[in-house]
Amino acid sequence: MYIDSHTHLSDDLLIGDIDKIISDFSESGIEMVFEIGSDMASSRSAAKLASQYDCIYAVVGCHPIATDDVTEADMLELEQLAKGDKIVALGEIGLDYHYDIDHNRQKALFVKQIILADKLSLPIVVHLRDAYQDMEQILTENKQYINNGILFHCYSGSAEMVDRFAFLDPYYAFGGAITFKKNNRELAIKAVPQDRLLIETDCPYMTPVPFRGKVNNPNYIYLVAEKMGEGLRMSGEEVGVLTNINTKRFYRINK
């Protein structure tokens, strides 16, 4: 059995396909998935999906790309939304310097959500792209608010940064990118303690080989597990068992 720790099933690319995708979970050996918000609209959708399907849990939050659109009213709504049933973390939140979005505003929103997650006793799911120095600084300065777990989703950093983030005892999720021809994440995967490894699809994006170029969905998660297993000298099924345990521990799922 597999768990997809990070999906965006409510994305426009998957409109109309959700029921079919979920109906295939049993055949694909998928036990559960975690639907992730990236702004207020997708966070509401994540919470709604979790209420509709037993196999879906929700994570709500505002991605750094949404920074300029987040209001104080949104933050108040996010707090109430995060208290709902089957909401298991705040995310995806963080920093993304790939796009021309004010860095200071990104950092301010990130810190607000770190503090909110601590207030609600929720773990955080972190998006990190091209901002490793500032990420390390923010997490160091706000370590007192990170008491319920932290997960770096779709990790693309180095093994060295795994060592630098070790003071947080974080979890790391790897997705379809590890199957790409120019993948350079094997050393990072090996640097992560095995009890902190997760797998994800980040669907509908980051579709793993051999389906790259098509719309991604959780039923391809076995390909991520198999690729991760190559570096760890494990089968895909063994990676599934390992990451299922780790994912349930991080998100505090007791079944």
Image (tube, rainbow, N blue to C red):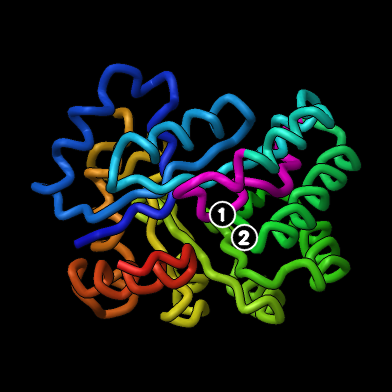
Q: Which quadrant would residue 40 be assigned to in this image?
A: top right
Determine which quarter of the picture holds residue 43.
top right
Q: Is residue 237 left or right of residue 11?
A: left
Q: Is residue 76 above or below residue 83?
A: above
Magenta stretch contains residue 246: no
Q: Quadrant of residue 174?
A: bottom left
Residue 136 vs residue 182, the one in the foreground = 136
Give neighbour class at mark 2: few <14, some 14-19, many 20+ (Cα, 10 Å).
Answer: many
Under mark 1, the amino acid is Ala
The residue that label 1 is drawn on is 89
> Are the residues flagged by discs 1 and 2 in contact, CB closer than 8 Å?
yes
N-term mark: 1 or 2: 1
For residue 122, the mark is 2
User: Which quarter of the rendering shows the N terminus?
Assistant: bottom left
Percent position (x, y) of residue 110?
78, 48
- Image coordinates of residue 64 in percent, x first then y, are 72, 38
What crowding class fits label 1: few (fewer than 14 Cα within 10 Å), some (14-19), or many (20 or more)? many
Disc 1 is placed on an element classified as: strand
Q: Which mark is residue 134?
A: none
Who's the residue at 34% across and 73% down the image? Answer: 245
Q: Secondary structure beneath disc 2?
A: loop
Task: Work out whether 157 lies above or below 86.
Answer: below
Is residue 240 positioned above or below 183 on the image? below
Residue drawn at the location 79% of the way across and 28% of the way down: 73
The quadrant in which the C terminus is found is bottom left
Instruction: Locate residue 152 relative to residue 94 in the image: left or right.
Output: left
Give the residue type at disc 2: Leu
Residue 181 position, x and y percent, is: 37, 50
Magenta residues (range): 81-99
What x and y, as percent, mark residue 128? Answer: 66, 51
List the single residue furthest toward the right. 104
